[in-house]
């Protein structure tokens, strides 16, 4: 349930056979970003190298005069929930920031013996992606988004684990250093892990927006292997951003939703027999955190402007179809008003798309995807979709 683990847990299995050597040295990595790693078998190592080469090789150059976004979405722990979250978050971020071609997913995999779909989330691969982003992006105008999901330790370390093969951690100062070394300026950092509020202070600068699943002294929830999302990922990506909210709105919506889920979780804990409560840790509020530099906020707004326009056009198209079919979204039965609003949103999306080199056909396809998404999520997220339609109807 909780995503917090002691920092050293992931390393224990790897160093157990050589305790004296590591005990004498303390941290064998000397505070650097890295991991203790056993080599992949030759065929898997070759496959990983090919996957990495393909992922980096297909990244297009940035477009002068356009705020391009490069997205790195990473699962650092080899349980299915984290890979699922990294994969789906990458898709949602790619649509929101018009970054599908500029998105890389890394994963610790699904566990021993499971086939790999993505390059390994090793420290070398992680830094290689950032290095390539730094080579391609223009630091004066482009945005880099880094999303990581895993378990987290009370000292703020995000754990790296592949059972029996990899153990390590990523700390906020190490991520900051890697981004600086890559020459990346404007960045959006999202961390889904227990105690991830430790990332707030090191990224409290004018060029960064940082969002974390929890405060520095709090766990977060929803990391059971059978789940598709953690609480933070579900609320931020699957509900708020997929529902059409802009990034700033999405965090506020996600925080409110997480609070409601955690209240339900606490109520279930309170309803347990006293003896069982003594065996179960009390689920305390995770208290997600945010810090946003003014310059970074402006870059994020420009980067997501096309995605926002497409989302509005798609959601209004969905609402218009419902109104015409006699099954209107509550409060939006006026087909004439919806037609006018949808046309305005479509024009805005086309204008934004043209500035990005997107053809009218590209934008039309993107709007259809947005409308289809609204149709798919509406049965479970009617309030989110309706609220977004209201915002898109506003002049």
Image (cartoon, rainbow, N blue to C red):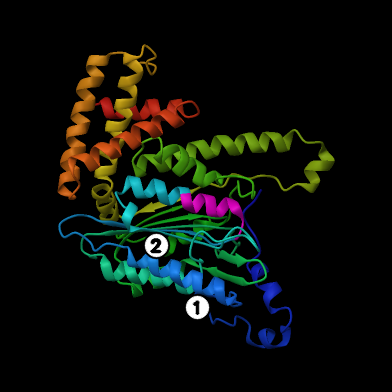
Q: Position of residue 69 (x, y in %)?
A: 29, 56
Left or right for 72, reference 198: left
- Image quadrant where residue 359 sits: top left
Q: Position of residue 33 (x, y in %)?
A: 49, 74
Q: Is residue 55 above or below residue 341?
A: below
Q: Is residue 46 above or below residue 92?
A: below
Q: Is residue 21 above or below residue 128?
A: below
The crowding category of the residue bearing disc 1, from other C-alpha atoms within 10 Å (few below 14, some 14 to 19, many at least 20), is some
Q: Position of residue 287 (x, y in %)?
A: 53, 46
Camera-near label (2 vs 1) is: 1
Cα distance between the residues tagged 2 and 1: 18 Å
Q: Is residue 275 above or below residue 46?
A: above
Is residue 131 one of those drawn in magenta? no
Q: Nearer the viewer, residue 71 or 364?
A: 364
Residue extent of the magenta highlight: 78-87
Q: What residue is shown with label 1? A: 32
Left or right for 307, reference 155: left
Task: Decide whether the magenta segment is chiefly helix, strand or loop.
Answer: helix
Q: Which mark is residue 203?
A: 2
Q: Quadrant of the C terminus?
A: top left
Residue depicted at x 39% and y 53%: 291
Residue projecting furthest to the front: 43
Earlier in the chain: of badge 2 and badge 1, it is 1
Is residue 86 one of those drawn in magenta? yes
Residue depicted at x 29% and y 40%: 366
Q: Position of residue 178 (x, y in %)?
A: 40, 72
- Image quadrant where residue 6 sits: bottom right
The crowding category of the residue bearing disc 2, from other C-alpha atoms within 10 Å (few below 14, some 14 to 19, many at least 20), is many
Residue depicted at x 28% and y 29%: 392
């Amino acid at each position: 349930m909780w995503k917090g683990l002691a920092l050293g847990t992931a390393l224990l299995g790897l160093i157990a056979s050589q305790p004296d050597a590591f005990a004498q040295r303390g941290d064998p990595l000397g505070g650097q970003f890295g991991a203790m790693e056993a080599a992949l078998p030759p065929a898997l190592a070759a496959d990983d190298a090919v996957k990495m080469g393909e992922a980096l090789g297909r990244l297009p150059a940035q477009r002068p005069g356009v705020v391009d976004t490069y997205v790195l979405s990473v699962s650092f722990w080899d349980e299915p929930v984290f890979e699922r979250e990294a994969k789906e978050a990458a898709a949602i971020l790619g649509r929101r920031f018009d970054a599908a071609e500029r998105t890389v997913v890394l994963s610790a995999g699904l566990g021993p013996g499971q086939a790999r779909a993505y390059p390994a989330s090793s420290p070398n691969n992680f830094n290689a992606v950032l290095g390539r982003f730094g080579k391609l992006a223009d630091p004066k105008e482009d945005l880099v988004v880094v999303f990581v999901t895993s378990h987290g330790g009370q000292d703020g370390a995000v754990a790296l684990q592949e059972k029996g093969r990899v153990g390590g951690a990523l700390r906020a100062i190490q991520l900051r250093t890697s981004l600086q070394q890559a020459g990346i300026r404007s960045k959006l950092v999202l961390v889904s892990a227990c105690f991830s509020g430790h990332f707030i202070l090191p990224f409290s600068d004018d060029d960064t927006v940082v969002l974390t699943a929890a405060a520095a002294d709090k766990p977060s929830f929803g990391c059971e292997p059978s789940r598709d999302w953690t609480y933070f990922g579900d609320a931020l990506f699957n509900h708020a951003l997929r529902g059409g909210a802009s990034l700033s709105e999405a965090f506020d919506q996600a925080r409110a939703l997480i609070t409601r889920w955690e209240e339900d979780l606490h109520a279930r804990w309170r309803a347990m027999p006293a003896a069982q409560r003594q065996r179960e840790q009390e689920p305390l509020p995770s208290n997600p955190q945010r810090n946003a530099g003014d310059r970074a906020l402006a870059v994020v707004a420009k980067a997501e402007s096309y995605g926002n326009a497409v989302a509005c056009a798609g959601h209004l198209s969905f609402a218009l179809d419902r109104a015409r079919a006699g099954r209107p979204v509550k409060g939006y039965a006026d087909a004439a008003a919806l037609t006018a609003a949808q046309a305005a949103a479509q024009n805005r999306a086309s204008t934004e798309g043209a500035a990005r080199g997107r053809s009218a056909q590209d934008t039309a396809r993107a709007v259809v995807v947005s409308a289809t998404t609204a149709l798919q999520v509406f049965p479970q997220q009617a309030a989110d979709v309706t609220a977004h339609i209201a915002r898109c109807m506003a002049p």
